[in-house]
């Protein structure tokens, strides 16, 4: 066996080894991206449910509710307050879903990370606005159903309002905590993919 033949064989082995390394990296990259893809798919499914079911549930509740509406200024003010805030929240949910659909782990890590940062900013703004405007929406619901706080003000009258406030605070805490955990987990998984690409 001559030197040129050996050199040609080594070059063939180098090409095969480089191709095998590339294939193995691609397989590993796909394996590493399955967890974050599943995580994003689950949130997409939840958002589809929110976007399509919430208007239907709201309409069914308003039309099939046994509560009689008082046709007056309070009804129209309640419809305006609740309707405007619910519509704004619905718009923000649709925008969140469109940003969520842009996340694709087959793209480069830099592009995916940019899309993820944009999604996180929007989610933070969406959650803050939702919880800041929630008391106004609740006032709209109280006006819509013509609910009054009985006089004199007693613990019995204040208990539902306090309960709404406590539920809102606890919900706010857990929503922000979940949001921070979710984005931190996705960023950690993106770091693993980025480390693989750097090798």
Image: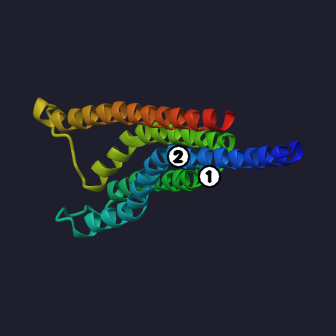
In this rendering, the answer to whether 138 lies above or below 94 is above
Q: Nearer the viewer, residue 18 or 191?
A: 18
Coordinates of residue 76 in the picture (x, y in percent): 38, 59
**Residue at disc 2, secondary structure:** helix
* Rendering quarter of residue 101: bottom right
Residue at (81, 44) in percent of width and height: 6
Q: Dot 1 surroundings within 10 Å: few (below 14), some, or many (20 or more)?
A: few
Residue at (36, 60) in percent of width and height: 54
| Residue 33: assigned label | 2
Query: Cα distance, mark 2 to mark 1?
Result: 8 Å
* Rendering quarter of residue 35: top left
Q: Nearer the viewer, residue 43 or 61?
A: 43
Residue at (58, 49) in percent of width and height: 105
Coordinates of residue 192 in the picture (x, y in percent): 56, 34
**Residue at disc 1, secondary structure:** loop
| Residue 106: assigned label | 1
Confirm or deny contact between disc 2 and disc 1 (CB under 8 A). Answer: yes
Coordinates of residue 96 in the picture (x, y in percent): 53, 50
Q: Nearer the viewer, residue 31 or 59?
A: 31
Residue at the outermost right position: 4
Q: Earlier in the sequence, mark 2 or mark 1?
A: 2
Coordinates of residue 65 in the picture (x, y in percent): 21, 65
């Amino acid at each position: 066996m001559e030197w040129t033949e050996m050199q040609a064989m080594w070059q063939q082995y180098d090409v095969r080894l480089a191709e095998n390394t590339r294939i193995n990296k691609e397989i590993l990259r796909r394996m590493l991206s399955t967890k974050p893809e599943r995580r994003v798919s689950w949130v997409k499914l939840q958002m589809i449910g929110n976007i399509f079911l919430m208007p239907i549930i709201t309409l069914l509740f308003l039309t099939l509710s046994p509560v009689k509406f008082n046709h007056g200024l309070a009804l129209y003010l309640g419809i305006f307050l609740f309707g405007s805030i619910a519509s704004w929240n619905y718009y923000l949910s649709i925008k969140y879903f469109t940003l969520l659909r842009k996340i694709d782990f087959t793209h480069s890590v830099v592009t995916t990370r940019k899309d993820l940062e944009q999604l996180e900013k929007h989610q933070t703004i969406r959650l803050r606005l939702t919880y800041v405007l929630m008391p106004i929406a609740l006032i709209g619901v109280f006006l819509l159903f013509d609910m009054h706080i009985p006089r004199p003000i007693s613990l019995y009258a204040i208990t539902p309002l306090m309960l709404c406030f406590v539920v809102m605070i606890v919900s706010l805490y857990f929503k922000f905590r979940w949001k921070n955990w979710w984005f931190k987990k996705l960023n950690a998984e993106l770091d693993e993919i980025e480390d693989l690409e750097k090798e």
